[in-house]
Each structure stands twice: as structure tokens, then as C-alpha cells.
């Protein structure tokens, strides 16, 4: 099926909001963001794909839980700046365990029951995605500087200043490993990763690119990997 994305109005980040509606009973299930690639994958595969602003990466609904959304139809509104995806939902749409993400009202009440155990389904997934969420926040600070923000101040110094902080934090991590206990090592490692993520954002590199590089090294010895790098 050929699609014409030029009809749509994406925002300045190349994104468009997408509302997912249950094709069986018209219940509104969730809202997420799509970029052009996510729309194309959604149409090609018949399963919903989105772009995470916090993790700065593509994701497929149900890739962790199995709670996929089988697409029936994709519509857009009269202003061409919002999508409506009608789909058959497996189990539930919300990561909290509710079928729909819209389960709370302004009075502080809950209008729906939990239909699955989120802790059992997702385990420590939230913690494992912390690096991606951190990068998303950092990338936003680069694009939208905030007064009083430490991250924004780092970006104002450019590569040289950020690089100096990375070297400083790396030294502190080594010192902690040599002279202090595990808690200090964890603390200093977190500081180093944060500053390294700022350096990645300044250099225009995403964590996903680093993951792909590491995945490509699997099964290679260190010396072999270094030889291949020079080719």
C-alpha cells in the first residue's frame, strides 16, 4: 500500500500525535507520537509503531509485553496534524495494567480496573530504559535551553568544556573504584554516564547508534574489533 505523507503536518521535530482507538468498541486507548518512519512501519507491518521523545528512538507497541495493536485503519483530521489509528488491542494498551491510558478523572478517581499485572509483565524494564529517558531529557535541554539548568550550562560550553567534565568524572570513577566502596562507585558511574550522554548529544550521536555499534561487536575479540575499525 502506497501512502502520501506529504498530506500530513508534522511539528518542528518531525512528529505528529497519534490517538489509538479500539476498532471493536471505539474506546480511546492511548496517545503517542509518530514520525514518518513510524507511520510507514505501522502501515507496512500492520502493527503500531511510535517514536519515543523521552528515549529518542522508535518502538513497537507490545514489543515487551506482547500486547500488540493490530491496525485496521489510519485516519487524519481536517487540519492534517493529528492521526487516528483504529486497531484491535491485545490485552491492554496502558503500561500500568489498565486497558486504556485514560483511566483517571479530574476529581482524582479511577474509572477502570487493572486487567493485568504490570510488575510481572514488565519486570525491571522501566529501570533498563532509564538511559534512554535520560538522553531524551538531555536532548531537549540542548534544543530548548532553560535558565538555571546545569545541562543547558554544559551545552553552552561546547565540546571542549563538556569533554573536560567527562574526563574529570572518569577520573573520579577510577578513584572511587580504588579507594571507596561500591556505593561511591555507583554514584560516580552515574555521573560519568550522564556527562557522556551530554557529550553524545552535543556531537549529534544517539544511544541507539552506540547500541548498534556494540551489537555489531558481539562475537568479536577485542583485537579483531580494533583491526576491523581501521579498515
Image: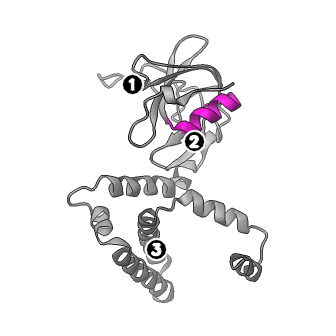
The quarter of the picture where residue 10 lies is top left
Please, is residue 192 above or below residue 81 in the view?
below
Instruction: Check residue 111 for magenta coloring.
Output: no
* Furthest residue toward top: 25
Label 3 with label 1: CB-CB less than 8 Å: no
Q: Tell me which numbered mark, 1 or 2, is placed earlier along the sequence.
A: 1
Measured Cα–Cα span from mark 3 to mark 2? 26 Å
Quarter the N terminus occupies:
top right
From the image, state whether disc 3 or disc 1 is nearer to you. 1
Measured Cα–Cα span from mark 3 to mark 1? 38 Å
Q: Residue at x 41, y 65 (%)?
A: 202
Q: Tell me which numbered mark, 3 or 2, is placed earlier along the sequence.
A: 2
x and y, in percent, of residue 221 in the image: 77, 78
Q: Which mark is residue 119?
A: 2
Report which residue position mark 3 lands on. Answer: 183
The quarter of the picture where residue 151 lies is bottom left
x and y, in percent, of residue 95 in the image: 53, 36
Q: Residues within 10 Å of mark 2 (few under 14, many from 20)?
A: few
Q: Which mark is residue 104?
A: 1
x and y, in percent, of residue 204 in the image: 47, 62
x and y, in percent, of residue 57 in the image: 54, 48
Instruction: Check residue 45 for magenta coloring.
Output: yes
Q: Residues within 10 Å of mark 3 (few under 14, many from 20)?
A: few
Left or right: 189 in relation to 150: right
Q: Which residues are magenta?
A: 34-50
Amino acid at each position: 500500500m502506497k501512502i502520501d505523507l506529504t498530506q500530513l503536518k508534522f511539528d518542528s521535530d518531525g512528529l505528529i500525535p497519534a490517538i489509538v482507538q479500539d476498532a471493536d468498541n471505539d474506546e480511546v486507548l492511548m496517545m503517542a507520537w509518530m514520525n514518518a518512519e513510524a507511520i510507514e512501519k505501522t502501515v507496512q507491518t500492520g502493527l503500531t509503531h511510535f517514536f519515543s521523545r523521552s528515549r529518542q528512538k522508535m518502538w513497537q507497541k507490545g514489543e515487551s509485553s506482547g500486547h500488540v495493536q493490530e491496525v485496521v485503519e489510519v485516519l487524519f483530521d481536517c487540519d492534517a496534524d493529528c492521526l487516528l489509528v483504529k486497531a484491535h488491542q491485545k490485552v491492554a494498551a496502558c503500561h500500568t495494567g489498565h486497558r486504556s491510558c485514560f483511566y483517571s478523572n479530574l476529581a482524582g478517581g479511577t474509572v477502570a480496573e487493572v486487567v493485568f499485572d504490570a510488575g510481572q509483565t514488565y519486570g525491571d524494564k522501566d529501570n533498563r530504559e532509564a538511559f534512554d529517558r535520560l538522553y531524551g531529557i538531555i536532548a531537549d535541554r540542548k534544543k530548548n535551553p532553560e535558565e538555571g539548568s546545569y545541562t543547558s550550562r554544559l551545552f553552552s560550553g561546547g565540546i571542549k568544556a563538556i569533554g573536560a567534565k567527562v574526563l574529570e568524572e572518569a577520573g573520579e570513577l577510577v578513584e572511587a573504584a580504588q579507594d571507596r566502596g561500591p556505593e561511591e562507585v555507583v554514584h560516580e558511574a552515574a555521573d560519568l554516564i550522564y556527562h557522556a550522554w551530554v557529550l553524545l548529544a552535543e556531537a549529534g550521536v544517539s544511544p541507539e547508534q552506540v547500541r548498534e555499534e556494540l551489537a555489531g561487536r558481539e562475537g568479536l575479540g577485542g583485537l579483531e574489533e580494533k583491526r576491523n575499525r581501521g579498515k
